[in-house]
């Protein structure tokens, strides 16, 4: 158990819908990272937040947005969902620097029908 | 090298064999190189983070080396056991985006009893 929690574990929804994925970092970690893993691709970095502020951005679609709240939990919002958004979404947390170990949560499997 | 590349893609070894994999990454503006172990149906588990050229890290039977000048890292497993079967991922932090980790596609290791 990494200490990072993610909810829900599984999510099944329809195209065009909007969902919110939630992540709570390890105690003491200030940074949260979101990753997407599709069937045909490796782990893709989406976005990083540090202490409530966006710090780094990957190839995150405009339909996706994230935020980190004062209690340091983070939410990833996915809207106007398409079939291709079906993937495993991981959250990771770390102290904050790129050379710090990132601890991964169990992931949320999103299926868009 | 523009992306993070891992070789081989997959590897089958017998219990007791020693093995190694390669991770190649862009050598300019290097910040850190991470290695993760990812078992099926679980989340990636951090093995090592390396930041300095010539770094060597060891954890039990697993060790890793880093060459930032030529842009490669090796992961070694001595005396492979069936429980070592997993996907081994490397992730590079560098370039213009400080916080971003770019993952390789992974090496799938299967250790046969």
Image (cartoon, rainbow, N blue to C red):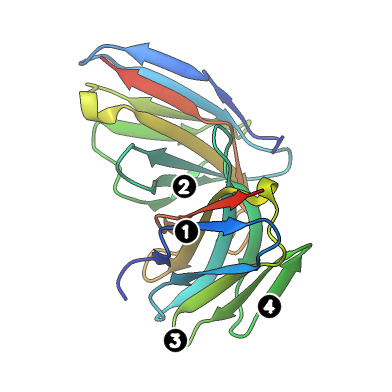
Is the residue marked by circle 4 packed among few (<14), some (14-19), or many (20+) residues within 10 Å?
Answer: some
Residue tagged 1:
B99
Q: Quadrant of residue B63?
A: bottom right
Check disc 1 and report its element: helix, strand or loop. loop
Front-lying residue, A49 or A8: A8
Check disc 2 and report its element: helix, strand or loop. strand
Asked if the residue under mark 3 is in contact with the one under mark 1, i.e. CB atoms within 8 Å, the reply is no
User: Which residue is drawn at the image coordinates 29% and 48% (left, top)?
Assistant: A59
Q: Find residue A48 and report its horizontal and vertical position in percent.
A: 46, 47
Camera-near label (1 vs 3) is: 3
Distance CA(mark 4)–CA(mark 2) = 28 Å
Residue tagged 2:
A48
Residue tagged 4:
B56
User: Which residue is drawn at the image coordinates 47% and 58% (left, top)?
Assistant: B99
Which one is earlier in the sequence, the residue at label 4 or at label 1?
4
Front-lying residue, A103 or B12: B12
Q: Find residue B31 and report its horizontal and vertical position in percent.
A: 51, 72
Camera-near label (3 vs 2) is: 3
Q: Find residue A43 and report its horizontal and vertical position in percent.
A: 41, 47
Subunit under mark 3: B
Q: Find residue A69 and report its horizontal and vertical position in percent.
A: 54, 31
Residue tagged 3:
B70
Q: Are marks 4 and 3 on the same chain?
A: yes
Q: Is residue B100 visible?
A: no
Subunit under mark 4: B
Q: Is residue A13 visible?
A: yes
């Amino acid at each position: 158990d990494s200490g990072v929690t993610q909810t829900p574990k599984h999510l099944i929804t329809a195209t065009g819908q909007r969902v919110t994925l939630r992540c709570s970092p390890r105690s003491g970690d200030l940074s949260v990272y979101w990753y997407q893993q599709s069937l045909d691709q490796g782990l893709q970095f989406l976005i990083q937040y540090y202490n409530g502020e966006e710090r780094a951005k990957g190839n995150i679609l405009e339909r996706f947005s994230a935020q980190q709240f004062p209690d340091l939990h983070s939410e990833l919002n996915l809207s106007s969902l398409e079939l291709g958004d079906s993937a495993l979404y991981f959250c990771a947390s770390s102290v904050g620097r790129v050379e710090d170990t990132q601890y991964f949560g169990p992931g949320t499997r999103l299926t868009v029908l | 090298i523009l992306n993070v590349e891992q070789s081989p893609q997959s590897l089958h070894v017998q219990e007791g064999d020693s093995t190694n994999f390669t991770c190649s990454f862009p050598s300019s503006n290097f910040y850190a190189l991470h290695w993760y172990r990812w078992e099926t149906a679980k989340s990636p588990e951090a093995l090592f983070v390396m930041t300095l050229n010539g770094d060597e890290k060891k954890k039990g039977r697993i060790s890793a080396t880093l060459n930032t000048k030529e842009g490669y890292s090796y992961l070694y497993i001595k005396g492979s056991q069936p429980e070592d079967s997993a996907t081994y991922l490397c992730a590079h932090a560098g370039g213009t985006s400080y916080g971003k980790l770019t993952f390789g596609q992974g090496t799938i290791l299967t250790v046969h009893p």
